[in-house]
Image: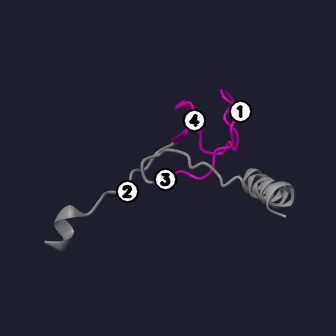
Amino acid sequence: MKGLFKRKKVITKVKICPNCGIELPLHVKNCFSCHTKVGKIDQYGRGKKPFDWIAYTICIFSWLVFIIYFWWAFLR
């Protein structure tokens, strides 16, 4: 029963952009159609979106500044 539902690993020669869906060669880092970064492929051949550390850091910093300003302006 264990081996009955095993998934087969798909072997592909292209990866698919997660943003626009275009097929790309395996060696490219950026999609030449929508210019987004494309990471390694998953088991279905779709490229993974890399984690955007800069955007999340800026977002957290902005919220922190807003909370400090709100405290300073209204709760002090």
Going from N to C along the chain, the mark reached first, 2 or 4, is 2
Amino acid type at image mark 2:
Lys
Sort mark 2 into few (<14), some (14-19) or many (20+) by Cα contacts within 10 Å: few
Q: How far apart are the two marked residues, 1 and 4, measured between alpha carbons? A: 9 Å
Q: Residue at x 75, y 52 (%)?
A: 59
Query: Quick one: label 1 or label 3, which is nearer the N terminus?
Result: 1
| Residue in the foreground of this view, choosing between 10 and 46 | 46
Gap in angstroms between the C-alphas marked 3 and 4: 15 Å
Residue 74 drawn at (x, y percent): 81, 56
**Quadrant of the frame with the C terminus:** bottom right
Q: Mark 3 and 2 residues: CB-CB less than 8 Å, in contact?
A: no
Q: Quadrant of residue 6?
A: bottom left
Q: Which residue is mark 3?
A: 42
- In this picture, which residue range is highlighted in magenta? 14-42
Would you call the spot at circle 4 few (<14 residues within 10 Å), some (14-19), or many (20 or more)? some
Label 1 neighbour load within 10 Å: few <14, some 14-19, many 20+: few
Q: Which mark is residue 35?
A: 1
Q: Is residue 13 left or right of residue 61?
A: left
Using the image as rendered, state which of residue 68 and residue 63 is in the foreground: 68
Counting residues from the start of the chain, the first of labels 1 and 4 encountered is 4
Q: Which residue is mark 2?
A: 9
Checking the image for residue 19, the label placed there is 4
Could you tell which of marks 1 and 2 lies nearer the N-terminus?
2
Q: Earlier in the sequence, mark 3 or mark 4?
A: 4
Amino acid under disc 4: Asn
Place of residue 1 in the rendered image (x, y in percent of width and height, measured from the top left): 13, 72
Q: Which residue is most to the left?
A: 1
